[in-house]
């Protein structure tokens, strides 16, 4: 299965983490590769340590691109995204995992850090026993068409609109 969680609403990564929690219950081996978050600490990294036998999370991007005080150059972000894509291919084609999540890969495509063609070629290499989840805003049409399941998160109301910052435990 290829699953895509997209849209402007909150909850794409959270939905993927919910799948992880469910799959761990069945003893699945899982890998999550975070394309954008970089060294920004998220609670799921601590949780992964508790399930280290079956869950690996790699926050390997250069962090948020052009937001949150980003001081990295476009070339640094592109090089990191290309490296992340190569790493993702190694993990995907290893045949070691039941579930692989490419977190915020849609954002990396939208920001032109990687191309949709590269991602489509990557997903085509998915082993028979492996399911793949791609998260992030603005999933490209080509990926949506390839997917078996697509869910769009729609923002209705968000605390940020009222000046409330992200909250530890709920947002990261």
Image: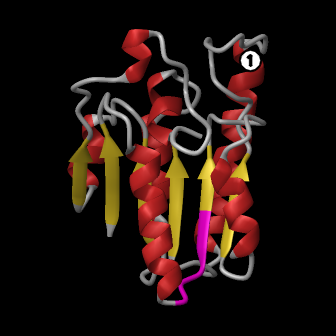
Q: Quadrant of the C terminus?
A: top right
Instruction: Using the image as rendered, state which of residue 143 and residue 125 is in the foreground.
Output: 143
Residue at the spot x=33%, y=30% of the render?
Answer: 138
Q: Quadrant of the N terminus?
A: bottom left
Instruction: Using the image as rendered, state which of residue 89 and residue 42 is in the foreground.
Output: 42
Image quadrant where residue 30 sits? bottom right
Where residue 56 appears, x then y in whole percent?
69, 67
Residue at the spot x=59%, y=26% of the render?
Answer: 113
Q: Which residue is mark 1?
A: 75
Q: Which residues are magenta?
A: 27-31
Instruction: Using the image as rendered, state which of residue 125 and residue 62 is in the foreground.
Output: 62
The answer to whether residue 138 is seen in the rendering is yes
Where residue 91 appears, x then y in whole percent?
66, 66
Image quadrant where residue 22 sits? bottom left
Measured along the vertical axis of the image, is residue 9 above or below residue 146?
A: above
Task: Check residue 55 for magenta coloring.
Answer: no
The answer to whether residue 130 is seen in the rendering is no
Where residue 44 appears, x then y in whole percent?
64, 55
Horizontally, is 23 left or right of 39 in the view? left
Measured along the vertical axis of the image, is residue 39 above or below residue 31?
A: above
Name the element at disc 1: helix
* Magenta stretch: dominant secondary structure: loop
Query: Neighbour class for label 1 at 10 Å: few (<14), some, many (≥20)?
Result: few
Task: Check residue 29 for magenta coloring.
Answer: yes
Horizontally, is 45 left or right of 138 in the view? right
Where residue 55 appears, x then y in whole percent?
65, 72
């Amino acid at each position: 299965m290829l699953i895509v969680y997209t849209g402007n609403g909150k909850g794409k990564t959270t939905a993927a983490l919910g799948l992880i929690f469910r799959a761990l219950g069945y003893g699945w081996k899982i890998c999550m590769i975070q394309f954008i978050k970089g060294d920004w600490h998220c609670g799921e990294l601590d949780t992964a340590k508790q399930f280290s036998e079956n869950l690996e999370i790699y926050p390997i991007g250069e962090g948020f691109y052009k937001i949150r005080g980003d001081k990295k150059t476009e070339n640094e972000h592109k090089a990191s995204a290309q490296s992340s894509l190569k790493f993702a291919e190694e993990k995907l084609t290893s045949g070691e995992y039941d579930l692989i999540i490419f977190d915020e890969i849609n954002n990396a495509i939208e920001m032109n850090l990687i191309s949709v063609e590269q991602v489509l070629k990557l997903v085509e290499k998915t082993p028979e026993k492996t399911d793949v989840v791609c998260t992030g805003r603005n999933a490209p049409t080509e990926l949506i068409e390839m997917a078996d399941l697509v869910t769009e998160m729609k923002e209705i109301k968000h605390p940020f609109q009222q000046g409330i910052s992200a909250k530890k435990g709920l947002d990261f």
